[in-house]
Amino acid sequence: MPDGLAGRVALVTGAGSGIGRATAIRLATDGAALGCLDRNIAGAEETVAAIERQGGRALALGADVTLAS
C-alpha cells in the first residue's frame, strides 16, 4: 500500500456503498486510516472489511449526517 496519506485520518460519510465506499477504499489505498460513516452500519462494516483485506486500517461508525427540517 502506498503511504502518500500515511499518518492521516479521513472520515467518509456514506461509506457503506457507492461513491462513499469507493472514496474510502481509495483513501485507504493511499495510506490513510479511515472512519467509515453510514446510516447502514452493515454497509460500513463491509467497507471496513474490504479495506482491512487490503492491509488498511478502518473503523465502521453508524451515523446519520442529514438535517431533518
Image: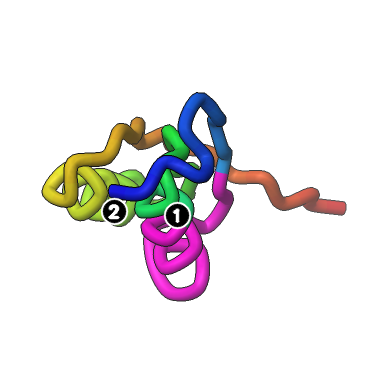
Label 2: element kind: helix
Q: Position of residue 35 (x, y in %)?
A: 46, 35
**Visible residue check, residue 11:** yes
Residue that mark 2 sits on: 47
Tell me the distance, in whole angstroms, between the alpha carbons under discs 1 and 2.
Answer: 8 Å
- Nearer mark to the viewer, of 1 and 2: 1
Give the magenta-colored segment's residue range: 12-26
In this picture, residue 19 sits left or right of residue 29: right
Structural crowding at the residue carrying mark 2, measured as other residues with C-alpha within 10 Å and reported as few (<14), some (14–19) or many (≥20): many
Name the foreground residue: 45 vs 10: 10
Label 1: element kind: helix
Q: Which label is found at residue 24?
A: 1
- Residue at position x 39%, y 67% from top? 17
- Check the image and name the residue furthest to the left: 53
Q: Position of residue 2 (x, y in %)?
A: 36, 49
The answer to whether marks 1 and 2 mark residues whose Cβ atoms lie closer than 8 Å is: yes
- Residue at position x 43%, y 60% from top? 26
